[in-house]
Image (cartoon, rainbow, N blue to C red):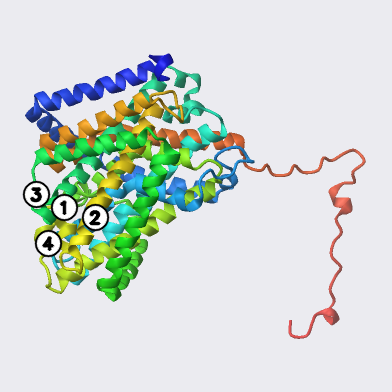
Amino acid sequence: MQKRWKVDPAVFLIAAGLVTLFLLWGVVFTDSLASVTDSTLTWLLDRFGWLFVLSAAAFVAFAAYMGFSRHGKLRLGQDGDRPEFRTSSWIAMMFSAGMGIGLMFYGVAEPISHLAAPPLGHGQPGTPETAKVAMQYTFFHWALTPWAIYGVVGLALGYFCMRKGRPNLISEAFRPLIGDRVDGAMGKAIDILAIWATLFGSATSLGLGAAQINSGLNFLWGVSISNTLGVVIIVILTAMFVLSATTGVEKGIQFLSNLNMGLAILLLVFLLVVGPTVFIMQTFTDALGAYLQNFVPMSLDSGAFGGGEWLNSWTIFYWAWWISWAPFVGTFLARISRGRTIREYLLGVILVPSGVSFIWFAILGGGALDLQLSGKADLITAAAKPEVALFTTLEHFPLSGITSFLVVILVSLFFVSGADAASVVMGTMSSRGALEPSRRVVVIWGSLTGLAAAVLLVAGGLTALQQAAIIAAAPFVLIVLGACAGLFKAMRAEHPPAAAPAPPAVTAESPPVAAVTQAPPAVTASEVPVGS
């Protein structure tokens, strides 16, 4: 199998076997799976929620250091390499792979949910003051921090793979720390954890996408909303993204990513023009200012003095979700970023998608907040089912049928482009880091991801999807911290700090210091300047 499929048998068989056992558990003992995941999640959040909060803040600080330090001039590749993809395609691919479905799902639902239940008790439900806080925390969850998490993982992979010529594996980032033991059981365990986190992080997004597509079909044509239809949608789109994944990055993923970006921009421009344009721009400005002003306090709030339940449901869930996506998005970012300097890479990966997220939520969320605050719509009730919130909002703007259909298309394309990137990456991680894994391996991982999404959707709906993301990310947060440490050690070895010049040696012929040091001439009263 190793020869024909180009896989690492231990990593592939153990990872695929564990996932298969989990899926059988969910199919045969659905209630048991839901109960165990719920109790496991409660235990993790009670004892280790602070670790997610502190780690996410550390990743932001580490990314800032790497980007602006002397290491920022190094290239992800050899010094003579130049970027493989043009900048526009590079941005489109990393954005659609990173969080496309989530933006569609939460674009309206999150700001309205925070308006109904103020974050950490800041304000009264339904007031303009709370609306500002709602957008501030929405920006917090979707901008700098998640992309810093993706960025540092991709940086570690890109550095060791593209510059040092090592396999494109998470475990390679640990070589500076544990040496050749990374080639043994310890390294394989790290790569298996990376596959596990990637699969369930991706399955969470696929489940959310399927639920939103189902709601869109209900809005447009009255199709009933059910888990059965959700599973059918997952099966159809899984077949589509497996087909896309087997065409490779240059063809399938790049084409779909560019198409996604174009349609998303079209939707945003339309809503900006026909929506409350002035309010949207004011929302963008005010929320961005509040976000930047309060970034550090928000980043280090673990709920020790209240608000723990809200943080568990929102902030910690998001940090775990992003961490669970980090191995796949990081591997994908490394794959498409060869030839870029570390500074260019980090600025592009963190600032550009963050800016798009600010604009996205300002337009979708700002338009929804205006409808709610002005009394034109009751979106708080709609947000109780987040998958329908965006369609309910579009209903109050012109051409709602067309825009709603466009949303269904966009979610479907984000589903395909994100999931096929994930299946290729899992193929890479189970094939000794091969940048072009076997198509059969890619198909297997794509199919298992779709099955995992379907099983979790049936087992507990959206709640089970969120629980799976956090549980899968719990051990992997330690892996990401270790990868940062390994990267830092390797870069210091390649690019050590400049040494201070040594003082000149004193020889026997050198005159004593006292002999060559002359006292300043005495200043008389007549030589003192006027006014001194």
Residue 315 in picture, x, y percent from top left: 25, 49
Choose top left, top right, bottom left or bottom right for residue 2: top left
Q: Amino acid at mark 3?
A: Val
Say which element carries label 4: helix
State the residue position of label 2: 407
What distance separates the C-alpha of mark 1 from that of mark 4? 18 Å
State the residue position of label 3: 223
Q: Amino acid at mark 2?
A: Val
Residue 328 in picture, x, y percent from top left: 37, 36
Say above or below: 298 vs 373. Answer: above
Left/right placement of residue 186 relative to residue 303 reads right
Which mark lies nearer to you, 1 or 3? 3
The numbered disc on residue 380 is: 4
Say which element carries label 1: helix
> Are dots 4 and 2 in contact, CB under 8 Å?
no
Q: Amino acid at mark 1?
A: Gly
